Amino acid sequence: MKKNTNHFLSVIIPVYKQSSTIKSDLFNIYQTLLQIRYDFEIIVVVDGTNIDSSYQKAKELKLSKMKIYGYPNNRGKGYAVRYGMARTRGDYIAFIDSGMEIDPNGISLIIEHLEWYNADIIVASKRHPASQVKYPFDRKIISFMAKIFSKVLLGINVNDTQAGLKIFRKNVLKKVLPRLLVKRYAFDLEMLAVANHLGFTKIFEAPIKLNYDFKSLTHASGLKIIYKSLIDALAVFYRLRILHYYDDKNHRNFIYDPELSMRINTGL
C-alpha cells in the first residue's frame, strides 16, 4: 500500500501485567497498522517492569517500527501514556489499550475522522450509534459518571471520555501535557478538559468495536475504580473551575517532569 507522506502517526500502547498475551497483542496491532495509509511508529510503555515479564517479552518481538520503553514501578496508565507521548515524533498521536478488547482497526477510523472533521481530538466512543460494544455494568457506571462530569461540570461536548482509544494533533499535546497532574484513573478526562479549556474545542467522537473482558474486573475492584475515578474527576473540576490552575498565567506552577516533557524539535 502506498503510504500518505503528509502525516506521520505515532501510536502509544501502555502495558500493565500482560506477560501472557503481550507478544500476540502487540503483533496484532502492528499487523493492523501495516495496512493503513500512513507511515507510523509504535511506542510501547510497560508500566512497571519489575511486576512481571511483559517488558522482556515485548522486547523479543524486535519489530522495526516499534520501540519498547519501561520503568521499574507501576505509576498508572495516565503516566504511561504521557511517558510515551513525550517520546513520539508524529504529528498525529494516538493511544490504544494493549489488550485486544478494542479492535485495532479503529485506529484507521479515528485518523479518518480527524481529517474529515479537521478536528483537534477524536475520541473513540462506546455511545456512538455505529459502535459495537460489550462491557460490564461496573464499567458502564464509570462511563456514565464521566459523561456527566465532562458535559455538565467541564463543558466537554462528548458522550464518552473513557474508551482506551484516542487521537490528538501534536500541537494540542504540546500545550496540554505540561499542565496535567492525573496519572491514573481520570487522566483521559483531564486531557480533554484542559484541551477544551485552552481552545482546542474541535473534539469529536468515532465508533469503536469493544469486547471487554468480564473476568478482569471483580466487584470490589470495580467499586475501587469508581471511587478513585470520582476523586480524580472532582480534583480536575476544582483545578479547572476554582483554582484556574490550567490557565496560561499559572505556567510557573506547572510541574516539570523531564520524563514527561514532550520534545519540541521532532523532525522526521
Image: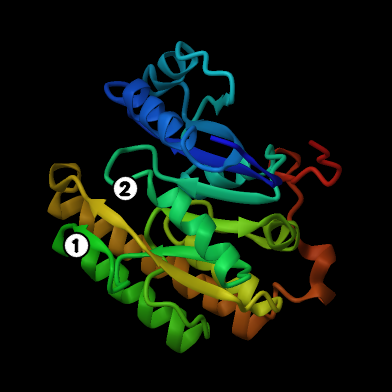
| Residue 209 horizontal/vertical position (percent) | 28, 55
Q: Judging from the image, what secondary structure is the residue with disc 2 in?
A: loop
Circle 1 or circle 2, nearest the eye: 2
Which residue shows up at 45% across the image and 49% down it? 107
Other-residue count near label 1 (Cα within 10 Å), few / some / many at <14 / 14–19 / ≥20: some
**Image check: 152 left or right of 93?**
left
Judging depth in this view, the residue of 107 and 72 nearest the camera is: 107
Judging depth in this view, the residue of 49 and 194 nearest the camera is: 194
In the rendered image, which quarter is residue 43 located in?
Answer: top right
**Image check: 224 left or right of 85?**
left
**What label does residue 195 carry, if any?**
none
Which residue is labeled 2 in the image? Answer: 102
In the rendered image, which quarter is residue 248 located in?
Answer: bottom right
**Residue 187 visible here:** no
Which residue shows up at 31% across the image and 69% down it? 143
| Residue 2 horizontal/vertical position (percent) | 59, 37
| Residue 35 horizontal/vertical position (percent) | 46, 36
Which residue type does callout 1 highlight? Asp
Which residue type does callout 2 highlight? Ile
Which residue is labeled 1 in the image? Answer: 138
In the rendered image, which quarter is residue 144 located in?
Answer: bottom left
**Image check: 202 left or right of 188?**
right
Confirm or deny contact between disc 1 and disc 2 (CB under 8 A).
no
Looking at marks 1 and 2 on the same chain, the residue that comes earlier in the sequence is marked by: 2
**Image check: 56 left or right of 225?**
right
